[in-house]
Amino acid sequence: MPQALESTALDTLFTAARSHNGWTAEPVSDATLRQLYDLVKMGPTSANCSPARFVFLRTPEARQKLAPALSKGNLEKTLSAPVTVIVAWDREFYEQLPRLFPHGDARSWFTGSPAVAHETAFRNGSLQAGYLILAARALGLDSGPLSGFDKDKVDAAFFAGTTWSTNLLVNLGHGDPSKVFGRLPRLAFDEACQLA
Amino acid sequence: MPQALESTALDTLFTAARSHNGWTAEPVSDATLRQLYDLVKMGPTSANCSPARFVFLRTPEARQKLAPALSKGNLEKTLSAPVTVIVAWDREFYEQLPRLFPHGDARSWFTGSPAVAHETAFRNGSLQAGYLILAARALGLDSGPLSGFDKDKVDAAFFAGTTWSTNLLVNLGHGDPSKVFGRLPRLAFDEACQLA
């Protein structure tokens, strides 16, 4: 039986967590990034298709390669983050399905239909990005997801000649609370939800 | 400072959690669904755009309306779940931006560009679906997400004449452990990740 989380854990994941724009000097170790992936990979995807791919940028060189793709407002907070994750997807994720979903010929659902393959990769790769943001918080990290950047430039700089495509960026580290913006409003239940 | 979660909480969210195919008779109250939305809504979205919309199907009538859209393999487990959530997005999510993101004229980023609006809604609506799956687990619920269904039929049955579009379905309840499938393999770190 799964155990519901305590309220402090709900705070860490959802209620008190914030997207961060500034970072302390505390680093994020490669061991933590491996621990992070070991959580993210367990999150459910359709037919276990697991299309997301993750490039963890830690070095100044990798960061400089990313810089030309960033919008002005996202530049400084990204260059100063201990880690920036390029969350991508593999356009040929279905080549892994004979191993990831051995129950049937799931590969053939996608090889003949580029539109279905794209939609599946984008939907499930984005679900996995959601798992990444919450798994980082679960490990005591702060995150700053962003999509204000030039995806074609990131693809050209990092993924030329590969089957990977950029989805979004997620800065990771230990946030500087003094640089957090005021909390923005959310839609009320009755605006976003229906009971039927 | 955020507190890292204990290992039992990581189990509940990621490591021990499973997608469920069968359900106990234990119901899910409307109060729990409201608590669920109050967590999900706090998850980050690009410019706070919050495009996801949720229809919680609890009644037999609502379920029967969904049935014709389900694939054979997903029919019984969906009709027997205490709650099925249609996770949708609002194609005109940007109409809420003057309130949700008062810092600038974010509405205008989307009104002139249907392709950018669609991509933003699909990406962020899917992120929010990831938050929903993990928030349900955090509250001690089990989930069974699925995309094996006819989206056009769901749109026609539930969203005709509205600006909402179906993304995926998520069954919610208390899972019957005897109906869980064997755990499928995941990609190793070096297959899905790069350190740069």
Image (cartoon, coloured by chain):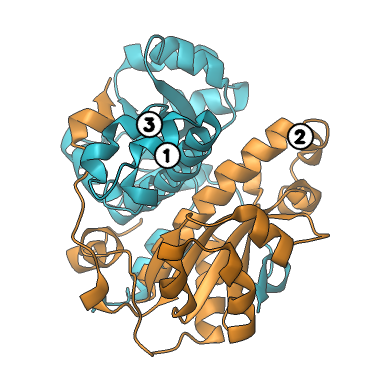
Chain colours: A cyan, B orange
Residue located beneath label 1 in the image = A109
Determine the CA span between mark 1 and mark 3: 30 Å
Instruction: Relative to A77, say whether B33 is above or below.
Output: below
Determine the CA span between mark 1 and mark 2: 28 Å
Label 1: state its secondary structure: helix
For the image shown, how many numbered marks are present on the structure? Answer: 3
Q: Horizontally, is B109 left or right of A62 in the view?
A: right
Q: Residue A8 appears at what percent x and percent y?
A: 35, 70
Residue B15, numbered label: none
Q: Quadrant of the N terminus of chain A?
A: bottom left
Q: Quadrant of the C terminus of chain A?
A: bottom right
Residue located beneath label 3 in the image = A85
Q: Horizontally, is A51 left or right of B110 in the view?
A: left
Task: Name the quadrant containing residue A26.
Answer: top left
Q: Please indicate, yes or no, whether residue B166 appears anywhere in the rendered image.
A: no
Task: Name the quadrant containing residue A37.
Answer: top left
Number of the front mark, 1 or 3: 1
Q: What amino acid is found at the position of numbered circle 1 in the picture?
A: Trp
Instruction: Relative to A79, say whether B100 is above or below.
Output: below
Determine the CA span between mark 2 and mark 3: 27 Å
Circle 1 marks a residue in which chain?
A: A
Residue located beneath label 2 in the image = B114
Number of the front mark, 1 or 2: 1
Q: Nearer the viewer, residue B151 or A195?
A: B151
Q: Residue A133 appears at what percent x and percent y?
A: 40, 47
Label 3: state its secondary structure: strand
Circle 2 marks a residue in which chain?
A: B
Circle 3 marks a residue in which chain?
A: A
Q: Residue B6 appears at what percent x and percent y?
A: 21, 64
Picture residue at 40% right of the left edge, 60% below the top: A13
